Amino acid sequence: KEDILSVAVGEIGLTYDYFYSLSLSEYYTIVDGFRRKEVNQLKATRWAVWQIVRHNAFLKNPPASPEKLMKFEDEILLDQERTNKAAEKLKSAIKKRNGNS
């Protein structure tokens, strides 16, 4: 029980009163949502770091022509658009699953 309490009060930040008012299935739903949020934040951070690395690599080895530079910048914008669309789809799926459509 101490492990469950340490996750609820420590990691997630629930109050003791709120934690003890939850059923076990409600608690696990909250933990599942919290873990999904952590995973999504990690993916977003990895994506941002990758873009920085990619940009720095480009600066050290720039392409020979302006056309290649434009193509590189277009790829970054396209990646951002894809990531934003995927995040929106995930949010709407979660809302539908929770009945908040």
Image: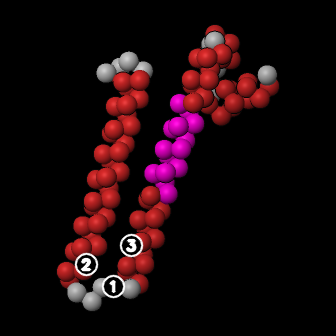
Q: CA distance from mark 1 to mark 2?
A: 8 Å
- Amino acid type at circle 3 is His
Residue 49 numbered mark, or none: none
Residue visible at 24% across and 80% down in the picture: 68
- The x, y position of residue 73, in whole percent, is 27, 70
- The x, y position of residue 61, in whole percent, is 38, 86
- The x, y position of residue 85, in whole percent, is 30, 45
Q: Secondary structure at mark 2?
A: helix
Does residue 87 appear to the left or right of 65 in the view shown? right
> Is any atom of residue 17 visible in this view?
no
Q: CA distance from mark 3 to mark 2?
A: 11 Å
Residue 62 numbered mark, or none: 1
Q: CA distance from mark 3 to mark 1?
A: 10 Å
Above or below, 60 against 94 in this view is below
| Part of the protein shown in magenta | 33-46
Q: Is residue 82 magenta?
A: no
Residue visible at 73% across and 26% down in the picture: 4
Does residue 23 appear to the left or right of 60 in the view shown? right
The quadrant in which the N terminus is found is top right
Residue 55 numbered mark, or none: 3
The quadrant in which the C terminus is found is top left
Residue 69 numbered mark, or none: 2
Query: Residue 21 lies in what quarter of the image?
Result: top right
- Name the chief secondary structure element in magenta: helix
Query: Residue 63 lies in what quarter of the image?
Result: bottom left
Above or below, 95 against 54 in this view is above
